Amino acid sequence: MAKAIAESGSADSVSSVECAISTWLYPILLEEVAAPPERQPLLSYFRLHEQRREAEVVSTCLS
């Protein structure tokens, strides 16, 4: 929000960078969520690292 205020002087606006990223990223994410699991590389990557992170937390708690 600070960038938007700095760029436009209004709190009711969106920064141009945020708008460009959203315009590019949202269609990709929507396609991926609608695809079958074997065609979800971004979500597969996220899930893999989420599982690793959870395993690290459990092993740290048990130590």
Image (cartoon, helix red, strand yellow):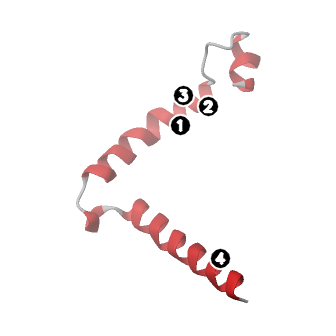
Q: Amino acid at mark 3?
A: Cys
Residue contact at pointers 1 and 4, CB within 8 angstroms: no
Q: In which quarter of the view is residue 37 placed?
A: bottom left
Residue at point 45% right, 68% down? 47
Q: Secondary structure at mark 1?
A: helix
In the picture of the structure, the residue carrying the numbered disc 4 is 57
Q: Earlier in the sequence, mark 4 or mark 2?
A: 2
- Mark 3, residue position: 19
Which residue, given by chain and number where applicable, does mark 2 sit on? Answer: 17
- Do residues under tags 2 and 3 come within 8 Å of each other at their CB atoms? yes
Q: Are marks 4 and 2 in contact (CB under 8 Å)?
A: no
| 14 sits to left or right of 9 | left
Instruction: State the SS at label 2.
Output: helix
Question: Splitting the image into 4 quarters, where does residue 23 fall?
Answer: top left
- Alpha carbon of mark 2 to alpha carbon of mark 3: how far? 5 Å
Q: Secondary structure at mark 3?
A: helix
**Residue that label 1 marks:** 21
* Residue 39 vertical placement versus 9 (above, below): below
Q: CA distance from mark 2 to mark 1?
A: 6 Å
How far is disc 3 from disc 4 in space, using C-alphas? 35 Å
Q: Where's residue 32, x and y in %?
A: 33, 53
Q: Earlier in the sequence, mark 1 or mark 4?
A: 1
Disc 1/disc 4 C-alpha distance (Å): 32 Å
The Cα–Cα distance between marks 1 and 3, rounded to whole angstroms, is: 6 Å
State the image coordinates of residue 51 (x, y, percent, origin top left): 51, 74
Q: Nearer the viewer, mark 4 or mark 2?
A: 4
**Which residue shows up at 48% across the image and 64% down it?**
46
Check whether the beta carbons of the residues at disc 2 and disc 1 lie within 8 A of each other: yes
